[in-house]
Image: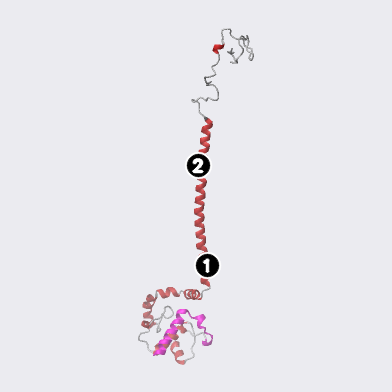
């Protein structure tokens, strides 16, 4: 017999439930006992499909968050590698530039180029046509044979029609611009007649390497070679 109050199974003929003590109904028979072959839908082993399985939902949410976190971490790592590559390339370029600078500083040709351009000779050389054209009148009015011989490298067209004596004056004209005195009487007489000339440095104290530019030294050599060939 089954207790109507607690559903405990008691022996047939029991007056009271041995579990809760409730009186047993005399009309309640064993035929009304539970059919053990039918499932008890209240049993936890048979969940109600109408109720939400929150444990499963939570597992799905946690799994999704884990996947998103992994993707974000991988993306950051990939971007970090790209940036590090850029930084590495920049560092390599800077290192290469520094190395070239160090190598160049020990190169005589590079030092010569620096000396050549340190006195603004490069700009003068690249604008040589402008210098020549704008100095043509000064050759006549300023008393110069070649007024731009300290600014640009001379060519044969610059000395066309000059005599050997004029080439000599043109060559020493470069020295005269720097205030060098002359031992030869004819040179002293010639340059003392020029309003722009101021002789203040004795020939023995004049140093070509420190007082003349590379352009001036090359022009002196050029004029001397043409003068000697005449």
Q: Main secondary structure of the magenta part?
A: helix
Task: Work out whether residue 31 can be spotted.
Answer: yes
Residue 3: quadrant of the picture: top right
Q: Position of residue 56 (x, y in %)?
A: 52, 32
| Quarter of the C terminus within the rendering | bottom left
- Which residue shows up at 52% across the image and 46% down it? 73
Q: Position of residue 108 (x, y in %)?
A: 51, 76
| Sequence-earlier tag: 1 or 2 | 2
Q: Which dot, 1 or 2, sits closer to the camera?
A: 2
Where is mark 2, residue-wise?
Answer: 68
Q: Nearer the viewer, residue 73 or 9?
A: 9
- Which residue shows up at 50% across the image and 59% down it? 89
Above or below: residue 177 compared with residue 26: below
Q: Position of residue 92 (x, y in %)?
A: 51, 62
Q: Position of residue 152 (x, y in %)?
A: 42, 78
Q: Nearer the viewer, residue 179 or 18?
A: 18
Residue 164: quadrant of the picture: bottom left
For the record, the magenta segment spans 202-230
Where is mark 1, residue-wise?
Answer: 99
> Helix or strand or loop: what does disc 2 sit on?
helix
Mark 2 crowdedness (10 Å alpha carbons): few <14, some 14-19, many ≥20: few
The answer to if 41 sits in the magenta stretch is no
């Amino acid at each position: 017999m089954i207790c109507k109050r607690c559903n405990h199974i008691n022996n047939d003929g029991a007056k009271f439930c041995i579990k809760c003590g409730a009186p047993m109904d005399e009309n309640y028979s064993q035929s009304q006992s539970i059919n053990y072959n039918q499932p008890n839908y209240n049993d936890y082993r048979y969940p109600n499909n109408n109720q939400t399985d929150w444990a499963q939902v939570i597992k799905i949410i946690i799994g999704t968050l884990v996947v998103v976190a992994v993707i974000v971490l991988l993306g950051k790592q990939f971007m970090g590698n790209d940036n590090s590559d850029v930084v590495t390339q920049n560092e390599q370029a800077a290192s290469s530039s520094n190395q070239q600078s160090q190598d160049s500083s020990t190169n005589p040709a590079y030092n010569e180029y620096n000396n050549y351009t340190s006195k603004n000779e490069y700009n003068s050389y690249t604008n040589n046509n402008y210098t020549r054209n704008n100095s043509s009148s000064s050759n006549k009015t300023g008393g110069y044979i070649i007024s731009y011989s300290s600014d640009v490298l001379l060519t044969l067209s610059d000395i066309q029609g000059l005599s050997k004596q004029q080439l000599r004056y043109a060559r020493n004209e470069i020295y005269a611009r720097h205030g060098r005195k002359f031992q030869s009487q004819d040179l002293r007489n010639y340059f003392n007649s020029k309003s722009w000339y101021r002789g203040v440095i004795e020939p023995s104290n004049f140093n070509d390497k420190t007082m003349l530019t590379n352009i001036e030294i090359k022009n002196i050599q050029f004029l001397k070679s043409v003068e000697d060939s005449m």
